[in-house]
Image (spheres, rainbow, N blue to C red):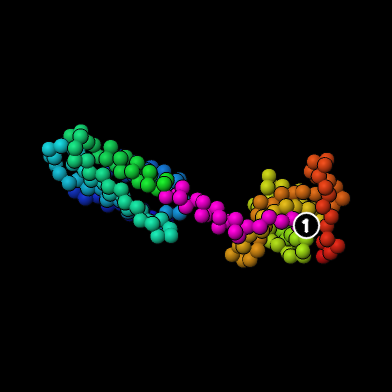
Amino acid sequence: MKIPPEITYRNLEKTDAIDALVQEKISKLEHICNYISSCRIAIEKVSDRPRSGSPYRVRIDLTVPPGHELVAEKNPSEGIQYEPLNAVIREAFDAMRHQLSKLTQLQRPSEQASRDETAQETTGFVTKLFRDQGYGFLKTLDGQEIYFHRNSILHNHFDRLEIGTGVHFSLEQGEQGPQASTVKIIDKPGVRAGKSDQTLIQPPLDWRQ
């Protein structure tokens, strides 16, 4: 969460049990959506002796990029008399969780389309390795040099890489320029590393440069 949650209590004292419950429920919201911008929670005692329902009111306000504002409020006016505070908190967070889940499901297709537009799968060969620093460079078949980090190598196979190792990878635009992700070893120079029917990919003439 970009901004720490803001929790206010009105006309009642905060207890460790209630605070723990609220923090637990916030964590579950972040599990559903890990890019929440802000979260404001107001917990209030509105009446000491209501004729029906609960004396408590709980309101949750969330902002989610790019500009969504979600609100869930629970102030049970009917039903179980003197419904306890923890029950009202759970009901409010359940309502917010439902809204947040629906929003993230709607956002995922557009996010996937955006990734598909920026990512391009291609083939290349390792030209530089800096094992101690955990990174290196690939050269594509058209001669473009691409940075990669050890964390981008699938199956933790960074230590298996050699100069000239053939790889298949996704080309993405990072903060510092083009970079490789989901790098998978295909072949090593002169050695077929895949299935027996897999065609050995020939490196470009200048792959050692």
Q: Can residue 132 be seen in this view?
A: no
> Can you say which quadrant of the picture contains the C terminus?
bottom right
Q: Can residue 115 be seen in this view?
A: yes
Identify the residue at horizontal 68%, vertical 47% (top origin): 154
Of the pair 22 and 104, the residue shown nearer to us:
104
Query: Does 108 appear in magenta?
Result: yes
Is 48 displayed left or right of 95 in the figure? left
Is 159 displayed left or right of 88 in the figure? right
Image quadrant in which you'd find residue 207: bottom right
Of the pair 109 and 190, the residue shown nearer to us:
109
Image quadrant in which you'd find residue 136: bottom right
Vertical order, 200 against 133 (above or below): above
Is 175 displayed left or right of 135 in the figure? left
Q: How many marks?
A: 1
Query: Does 47 appear in magenta?
Result: no
Range covered by the magenta-colored residues: 103-126
Identify the residue at horizontal 22%, vertical 44% (top origin): 75
Identify the residue at horizontal 50%, vertical 50% (top origin): 108
Of the pair 2 and 183, the residue shown nearer to us:
183
Q: What element carries label 1?
A: strand
Of the pair 123 and 85, the residue shown nearer to us:
123
> Can you say which quadrant of the picture contains the N terminus?
bottom left
Residue 39 % position (x, y): 36, 53
Identify the residue at horizontal 84%, vertical 64% (top origin): 206
Residue 127 % position (x, y): 78, 60
Mark 1 highlights which residue?
125
Magenta-drawn stretch, dominant element (helix, strand or loop): helix
Residue 134 % position (x, y): 68, 56
Sort mark 1 into few (<14), some (14-19) or many (20+) by Cα contacts within 10 Å.
Answer: many
Residue 85 % position (x, y): 25, 40
Identity of the amino acid at label 1?
Phe
Residue found at the very far top of the displayed protein:
80
